[in-house]
Image (spheres, rainbow, N blue to C red):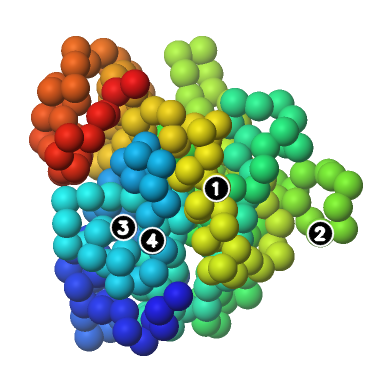
């Protein structure tokens, strides 16, 4: 992977609109971490167009900056979090790459492989690292990082999260990221993914990325999945179903008619231009 010294931090911050405390005071502190994380989450859409074409996107920094910062595209977790990691390192943070098992939709942790990428961020002068993640394509995703602290509830940009330790067979502590999902009859905590703190490297994610983007059984090779977050709402396009979840809890769903309507929505709502001739609906 390209060295973070070659990373254009100014270009990145200008694209996401997240200068943090100001260009003259880009300190590696918790305030900057939260500001950059939130701006990235809102500034770059999540999408799986490459995987839908059974093509593994490049995780090299020059290719990531060209795609995510200079073209009307987004990316999925490996692209998003690799880019964020480069930015945080350029700002002076320590970053460790972690893998996680996505648990949304399953009752058995062991039923899912470790395919999600997340980040452990060291903030100079702070006793605890932070979990940071701008690549989790779900409404339970973090918008701001959370300290690695068990059973404490954190609110970030309107979303509630906590970390809990989960009993398991392995020698390392198993952490779960939980999101609070509300409803008219109350809410509940739901695990989003589980992870341990053993570090993974760029080369590990090259293999995982290829598997997820090319395996015909991967969910990302089967159906279009695009999301965008604004201060007012979370917008998800899954296949031809568009779901808008508003900050006040209102949810609106509708089904798009055809490929033409999907392409127009990608461009107008998400700012994404799909490759010419690409089939967007199965």
Which numbered disc flags the more N-terminal residue, 3 or 4? Answer: 3
In x, y percent, where is residue 238? 35, 26
Question: Which of 191/127 is in front?
Answer: 191
In x, y percent, where is residue 219? 49, 32
Determine crowd level at label 1: few under 14, some 14-19, many 20+ residues with C-alpha closer than 10 A: some
Kindly identify the residue that appears in the image at 16 percent across and 30 percent down.
Answer: 263
Tell me the CA gap for discs 4 and 2.
31 Å
Determine crowd level at label 3: few under 14, some 14-19, many 20+ residues with C-alpha closer than 10 A: many
Image quarter of the C terminus: top left
Residue tagged 3? 40
Q: Is residue 147 visible?
A: no
Q: Secondary structure at mark 3?
A: helix
Tell me the CA gap for discs 4 and 1.
13 Å
Apparent side of residue 106 relative to residue 66 in the rendered image (left or right)? right
Residue tagged 4? 58
Label number found at residue 237: none
In x, y percent, where is residue 176? 66, 45
Determine crowd level at label 2: few under 14, some 14-19, many 20+ residues with C-alpha closer than 10 A: few
Which numbered disc flags the more N-terminal residue, 2 or 3? Answer: 3
Which numbered disc flags the more N-terminal residue, 2 or 1? Answer: 2
Residue tagged 1? 211
- Number of marks drawn: 4
Kindly report which numbered mark, 4 or 2, lies closer to the viewer in this rendering. 4
Q: Secondary structure at mark 2?
A: loop
Kindly identify the residue that appears in the image at 60 percent across and 40 percent down.
Answer: 102
Q: Secondary structure at mark 1?
A: helix
């Amino acid at each position: 992977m390209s060295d973070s010294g070659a990373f254009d931090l100014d270009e990145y911050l200008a694209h996401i609109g997240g200068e943090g405390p100001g260009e003259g005071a880009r300190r590696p502190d918790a305030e900057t971490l939260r500001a950059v994380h939130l701006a990235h989450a809102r500034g770059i859409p999540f999408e799986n167009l490459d995987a839908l074409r059974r093509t593994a996107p490049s995780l090299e920094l020059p290719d990531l900056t060209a795609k995510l910062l200079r073209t009307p595209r987004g990316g999925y977790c490996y692209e998003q979090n690799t880019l964020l990691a480069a930015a945080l390192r350029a700002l002076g943070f320590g970053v460790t790459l972690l893998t996680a098992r996505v648990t949304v939709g399953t009752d058995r942790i062991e039923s899912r492989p470790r395919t999600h990428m997340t980040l452990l961020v060291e903030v100079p002068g702070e006793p605890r690292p932070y979990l940071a993640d701008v690549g989790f394509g779900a409404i339970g995703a973090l918008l701001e990082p959370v300290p690695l602290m068990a059973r404490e509830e954190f609110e970030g940009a309107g979303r509630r999260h906590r970390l809990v330790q989960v009993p398991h067979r392995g020698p390392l502590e198993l952490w779960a990221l939980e999101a609070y999902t509300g409803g008219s009859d109350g809410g509940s905590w739901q695990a989003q993914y589980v992870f341990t703190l053993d570090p993974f490297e760029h080369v590990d994610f090259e293999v995982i990325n290829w598997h997820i983007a090319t395996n015909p059984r991967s969910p990302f090779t089967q159906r279009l999945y695009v999301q965008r977050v604004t201060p007012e709402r979370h917008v998800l396009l899954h296949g031809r179903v568009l779901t808008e979840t508003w900050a006040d809890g209102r949810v609106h769903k509708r089904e798009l008619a055809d490929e033409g309507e999907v392409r127009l929505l990608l461009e107008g709502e998400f700012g994404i231009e799909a490759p010419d001739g690409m089939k967007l609906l199965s």
